[in-house]
């Protein structure tokens, strides 16, 4: 069955959908819009470049959460250090 990649024109969410010819047009899982653009996809094999791009995108998405966690740990350590004196 064909697996297609889409991007929602409304919320810019990228997702994959399994679409058969008899199926209705998929809708965005985030905002339920049907205003989608089908992306050109590579073969199902992953290349080093594609893997690096995926890792980079994932790290960028998680960066704010990671920074918040680091700040929380720093503040906790600072409190402990100040209370020890």
Image (spheres, rainbow, N blue to C red):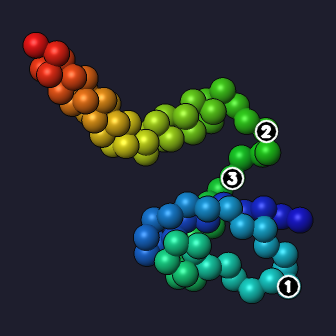
Location of residue 64 (image quadrant): top left
Callout 1 touching callout 3 (CB < 8 Å): no
Dot 1 corresponds to which residue? 22
Pointer 2: what residue? 45
Q: Quadrant of residue 10?
A: bottom left
Residue 66: x percent and y percent?
38, 36
- Residue under numbered circle 3: 41
Q: Nearer the viewer, residue 72 or 46?
A: 72
Quarter holding the C terminus? top left
Per the model, the C-alpha gap separating discs 2 and 1 is 27 Å
What x and y, as percent, mark residue 55? 55, 34
User: Residue at horizontal 84%, vertical 75%?
Assistant: 20
Residue at the spot 74% in from the left edge and 86% down from the top edge: 24
Indicate left or right for 54 with 62 as reference: right
Q: CA distance from mark 1 to mark 3?
A: 21 Å
Contact between labelled residues 1 and 2, with CB atoms less than 8 Å apart: no
On the rendered image, what quadrant is the N terminus found in?
A: bottom right
Mark 1: give few (<14), some (14-19) or many (20+) Cα within 10 Å. few
**SS for tag 2?**
loop
Q: Earlier in the sequence, mark 1 or mark 3?
A: 1
Distance between the Cα atoms at labels 2 and 3? 11 Å
Name the residue: 78% across, 62% down. 3
Precedes in sequence: disc 2 or disc 1: 1
Local packing at callout 2 (Cα closer than 10 Å; few below 14, some 14-19, many 20+) is few
Is residue 78 visible in the rendered image? The answer is: no
In this picture, residue 51 sits left or right of residue 44:
left
Q: Secondary structure at mark 1?
A: loop
């Amino acid at each position: 069955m064909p697996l297609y990649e889409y991007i929602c024109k409304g919320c810019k969410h990228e997702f994959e959908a399994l679409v058969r010819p008899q199926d209705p047009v998929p809708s965005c899982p985030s905002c339920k819009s049907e205003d989608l653009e089908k992306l050109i996809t590579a073969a199902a094999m992953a290349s080093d470049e594609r893997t690096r791009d995926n890792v980079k995108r994932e790290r960028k998405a998680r960066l704010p959460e990671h920074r918040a966690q680091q700040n929380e740990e720093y503040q906790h350590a600072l409190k402990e250090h100040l209370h020890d004196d």
